[in-house]
Image (tube, helix red, strand yellow):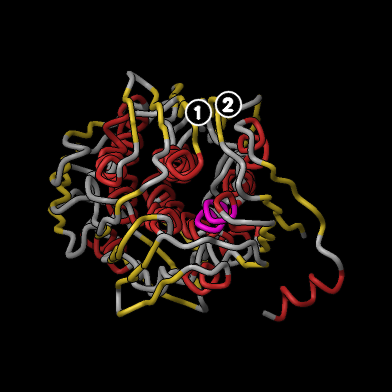
Amino acid sequence: MEKLLIEGGHSLKGTVRVSGAKNSAVALLPATILAESEVTLEGLPDISDIQTLKDLLSDIGGTVSQEGEDITIDPSQMVSMPLPNGRVKKLRASYYFMGAMLGRFKKAVIGMPGGCNLGPRPIDQHIKGFEALGAEVTNEQGAVYLRAEELTGAKIYLDVVSVGATINIMLAAVRAKGKTTIENAAKEPEIIDVATLLNAMGAKIKGAGTDVIRIEGVDELKGCRHTIIPDRIEAGTYTILAASKGEEVVIDNVIPTHLESLTAKLREMGVTIIEQEDSLIVRRNDKLKSVDIKTLVYPGFPTDLQQPFTSLLTQASGTSIVTDTIYQARFKHIDELRRMNASIKVEGSSAVISGPVLLEGAKVKASDLRAGASLVVAGLMADGVTEIVGLEHIDRGYDHLTRKLGELGAVVWREALTEEERKQFQNA
């Protein structure tokens, strides 16, 4: 186990290249199960979640080979093997194996998914969709069993806008008989990315990116090549980092429209942001203005950027209010920021931040992926050295973080935990 150490106060300057989208990749890899021949995915991030998914694909008989950022999966020899807990427990997105295996094999056994602990995140909308398509879904001994004689297209209305349910139902429906309509579908760019891959494989999907998706089932899908979209959350995190300490930072390999809800708020705070075709130029402002944000489904402000943005708001003059309407339990980073001298109080689903304050380096713990990102932002702004444990969370979503920060001028390094620190961390 390792810890991340950050010496705060150093200005950032230079160019950082954004990796492929984590939230696309974790759905694209299971989607390859639906093909009958080789699929190559280009530009995948080098993160631990990808390795977990590669192992799961191998477990069910897939042949997986990787060259740099490109992965080729041969799904022709895959079988519908049960995937109980174990690797499935490592990440929540393992639930995409449900839709993909149900679509291809008409059956699946998947352990209950894991991932970051962000409070209740039920999969009832996924199950509602599978049942509407004709599957029988039962929960037996901690695993979800899905069985269907045949999948038949249906009209499905999602009670809650859900990225996971939208993608999972798409995966199952592309090889169902007849037409499927998903109403109140999520609109995230990652959904368009998955639909683009499936259509390249021979699926017939229309309306991805709108709230109504129509799918005409096909009998077979073939292999193809597909390039993943840039990670808008990684791009947003580096944009926030640049807003906090950047003299002039170029965020390369981005789709600026994917970040409009963030860049609008940063401009409101006084940050200079210049949009180019596939990059952003960001310059900090030493006198930031307070703003209020409320997380919403896309194209609203992303819940995944709420935590790093909260760290930035500690440097804004006045009182800011952050309200998370997606995950009410997503304030576990607040106690850690308080250790660093932040003035924040939580009231229900909102955090009230008073600033500006001088953050101080401290020993802190990342409780989930984006909480880890918030502590990195805080550490770069703090006086002294910040030590962050819980790096396994950060490594799930940020590709080569230490190297990328170092290339921008940050003083950041990793060290192994001492035996005493390891015991304290495990008992915390």
Instruction: Name the residue at 59% across, 28% down.
Output: 69
Q: Residue at x 17, y 42 (%)?
A: 213
Compared to residue 193, the image places residue 15 above or below, namely above
Q: Which residues are magenta?
A: 373-379
**Residue 324 vertical placement versus 374 (above, below):** below
Q: On the image, numbered disc 1 is attached to which residue? A: 41
Q: Are circles 1 and 2 on residues that touch, CB within 8 Å?
A: yes
What residue sits 50% from the left and 56% below the top? 374
Residue 153 percent coordinates (x, y)? 19, 48
Distance, label 1 to label 2, CA atoms, is 6 Å
Tell me residue 275's x, y (percent). Answer: 31, 25
**How many residues crowd around disc 2 within 10 Å: few (fewer than 14), some, or many (20 or more)?**
some
| Secondary structure, magenta segment, majority class | helix
Provide residue 318's location: percent of width, then percent of height.
31, 62
Q: Is residue 261 magenta?
A: no
Q: Residues within 10 Å of mark 1 (few under 14, many from 20)?
A: many
Tag 2 residue: 70
Q: Quadrant of residue 64?
A: top right
